[in-house]
Image (tube, rainbow, N blue to C red):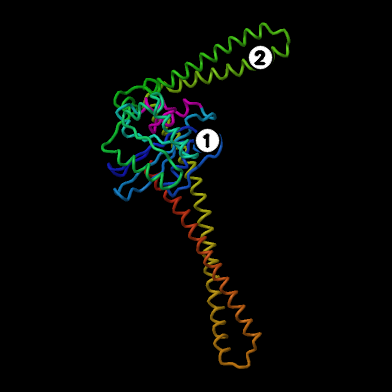
Amino acid sequence: MLTLQSANDIVILVIGVIGSGKSSFIQLLVEDDVNVGHGLGTGTTHVEFYDYRDERHQRNIYLIDTPGLNDATRSDATILKEIAFTLTSLSLRMLKAMCGESAYPHVVLVANMGGSTERDEASLSQLVSRQDWWGDMKAGGSQVTSHSNNAQSAGRILRLLIDARDEAVVLAIQRELVDENRSLEDTGTGRELGREIDQASEKLRARIRDMISAEQQAAESGLKSALARQRGEMQQDLERANESHKAIRMSLEKLTNEQALDMMKQLEREQKESEESLARLEKDLARAEARHSQLGKELSEELRQLSEQVDASKTDASISEMERRDMEARLKAVQRRRDKKAKGKRVMGELKRKIEIIQKRRRRRKQMG
């Protein structure tokens, strides 16, 4: 669980469907390497915390990256169990149920823009024109804006959220789970998911009935076999839907314990990976520093010798033009090696930056513990 360092700190959830640019948005703001997905698969598979320092108000901003809300590789109930623990949702309807109307003024709805300005503005207008899309949230105080996929745009959106925080906000799902001691299933978000699961289950049952009827009427044994296989797959889907319904029937205490255990395992895995990465980077840095130091000594010695020879050539009339050109060539070679040394310094700087990022993550995990 994330531990805030000050009552003035802010936690911002970044929520959206797969491919909407959640992780890319966070990457524009923080120094950490954020797992950005490319394509139809999801990049973020677990809730991730990233911190951003608001120098203007001298406080910490915690950005929470969440799994894609329509991830085909994970059930909705699995995602709900995980991100309800950190106060997120599965779809636009669930976002509304999770927040509650009183929290709408603390929400910024962002459209990722990538086409022509005219077409983007038309798309944004369409989103806010319908009450079942963004219209009701905008009417309730939510801000609507577009994102141009650059750091300046991301910073502007973050400032909108910071400025909207005039007081601490309690989301509907927080109030339902904590103050009203409801089960996850009995929250507005859980009921919305339950309706979706029930509708999907009813459709599956109807298709299974149709499949049984088709099997009975099929004369060809090969067709019967294919229909039976399809019916078996649908039956498995129905069983998964039933399991999803069971998965959300839990109290906050059970939810917290389950998620705390999962988070602990995740943190242990990440800690092991970060320790291994840190050890590799520190070893690479030590080698780079040793090479840099040795190269520096060699350059200093060559420059000293070359300087002595150049000084001597100025007063020695016996030095031929060819020898002078040779000394000039050697001088250029030393200068090239000096450039290489400068490049090595940049490499060391990059290694140190990566080490600092890993150390920063470790400090953040301690805060979460």
Q: Nearer the viewer, residue 229 or 338?
A: 338
On screen, residue 290 above or below 246: below
Query: Marks 1/2: CA distance?
Result: 32 Å
Q: Quadrant of residue 237?
A: top right
Position of residue 214 in the picture relative to residue 136 (left or right): right
Tell me whether circle 1 and circle 2 mark residues in contact (CB < 8 Å): no
Q: Give the residue type at disc 2.
A: Leu
Q: Residue furthest left?
A: 167
What percent of the width, then of the height, locates residue 54? 33, 48
Q: Is residue 272 magenta?
A: no
Position of residue 224 in the picture relative to residue 271 (left or right): right
The residue beneath circle 1 is: 42
Q: Which mark is residue 123?
A: none
Q: Which one is earlier in the sequence, the residue at label 1 or at label 2?
A: 1
Q: Residue at x 40, y 23 (%)?
A: 132
Q: Residue furthest front?
A: 118
Start and end of the magenta stretch? 75-98
What percent of the width, then of the height, locates residue 350? 49, 57
The residue beneath circle 2 is: 227
What percent of the width, then of the height, locates residue 359? 43, 51
Q: Secondary structure at mark 2?
A: helix
